[in-house]
Image: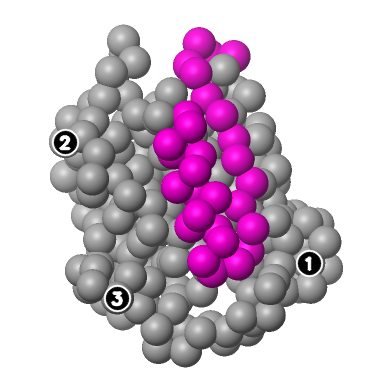
C-alpha cells in the first residue's frame, strides 16, 4: 500500500496543489496496479501529525509520500532531512505560531528520508519534469509533518517514507508572478518517486542510486 498526503490551502491561498497532485498520483498508481490512498492533512502543527498517525495506522502502508506546497520554488523538491524544530513565520490555519519549539521534546535533532531520493530524482528528471534534492523542508507545518512521519516510521519495520515539496500550480504562479508547475506534472513526479521505492514485483527496493545532488549553500 502506498499512502500519499497533501495539505489543505494555507496562507491566503484558495487551493493547495499538493493535495490535488496527491489525489491524482494515487489514482495513477491504482491504475498501474498498486494499492494507493490519498489523505488530506490540515495545515495545523499538532493536528496534522495526529491525522497522519491515524492514516498510517489505518492504511498500514509500505511507502509513504507526504507532499506540501513550497510557493516560489521552481522544481519538485525531494526533501532529504527533517529537523526537530517548529519556527513559524506565519500562523497555521488554527492561528498557532510556535517559535523555536521542538516537534518532539525528547526526539532526535533530525531524521533523514528513507525514500530512495536519488533514484526518485533520476526518474523524475528522465520524464522531463524539473526536480531537485532539497536540503531543507523549512520550519513550518511541512517540516513538522516530515519529522512526525519519520518519527512514526522509526517504530515500524518495512516502511519507507519521506517528504516532497511542489511549486505553486501554474495558475498560482501566474497570479503571484512566481514559478508554477502543472499539477499533472506534479502528480507524475509523485508517481515516479513512489514507484522508485518499489521493485518490479511491488516489494520494497533497498538502497539508492549514488548521484551528486548536493548544494554549496
Cα separation between marks 3 and 1: 31 Å
Residue drawn 40% across the image and 84% down it: 101
What label does residue 105 carry, if any?
A: 3
Residue mark closest to the camera, 3 vs 1: 3
Locate residue 2 relative to residue 150 in the image: left or right.
right
Nearest the eye: 1 or 129: 1
Q: Is residue 116 magenta?
A: no
Q: Secondary structure at mark 2?
A: loop
Q: Which residue is mark 1?
A: 13
Cα separation between marks 2 and 1: 38 Å
Nearest the eye: 62 or 54: 54
Locate residue 195 relative to residue 172 in the image: left or right.
left
Q: Which residue is mark 2?
A: 207
Q: Is residue 177 above or below residue 201?
A: below
Q: Position of residue 90 (x, y in %)?
A: 63, 84
User: How many marks do you count on the picture?
Assistant: 3
Q: Secondary structure at mark 3?
A: loop
- Image quarter where the C terminus lies is bottom left
Q: Is residue 43 magenta?
A: yes
Residue drawn 43% across the image and 36% down it: 57
- The magenta stretch is 31-59
Amino acid at each position: 500500500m502506498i499512502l500519499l498526503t497533501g495539505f489543505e490551502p494555507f496562507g491566503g491561498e484558495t487551493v493547495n496543489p499538493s493535495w490535488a497532485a496527491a489525489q491524482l498520483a494515487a489514482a495513477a498508481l491504482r491504475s498501474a496496479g498498486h494499492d494507493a490512498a490519498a489523505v488530506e492533512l490540515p495545515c495545523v502543527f499538532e493536528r496534522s501529525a495526529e491525522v497522519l498517525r491515524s492514516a498510517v495506522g489505518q492504511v498500514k502502508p509500505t511507502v509513504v509520500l507526504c507532499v506540501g506546497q513550497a510557493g516560489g520554488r521552481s522544481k519538485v523538491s525531494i526533501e532529504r532531512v527533517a529537523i526537530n524544530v517548529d519556527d513559524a513565520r506565519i500562523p497555521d490555519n488554527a492561528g498557532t505560531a510556535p517559535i523555536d519549539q521542538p516537534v518532539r521534546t525528547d526526539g532526535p535533532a533530525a531524521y533523514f528520508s528513507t525514500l530512495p531520493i536519488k533514484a526518485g530524482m533520476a526518474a523524475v528528471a528522465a520524464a522531463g519534469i524539473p526536480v531537485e534534492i532539497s536540503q531543507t523542508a523549512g520550519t513550518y507545518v511541512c517540516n513538522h509533518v516530515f519529522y512526525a512521519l519519520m518519527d512514526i516510521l522509526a517504530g515500524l519495520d518495512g516502511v519507507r517514507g519521506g517528504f516532497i515539496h511542489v511549486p505553486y500550480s501554474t495558475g498560482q504562479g501566474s497570479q503571484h508572478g512566481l514559478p508554477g508547475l502543472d499539477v499533472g506534472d506534479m502528480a507524475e513526479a509523485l508517481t515516479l518517486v513512489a514507484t522508485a521505492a518499489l521493485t518490479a514485483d511491488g516489494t520494497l527496493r533497498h538502497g539508492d542510486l549514488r548521484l551528486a545532488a548536493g548544494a554549496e549553500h
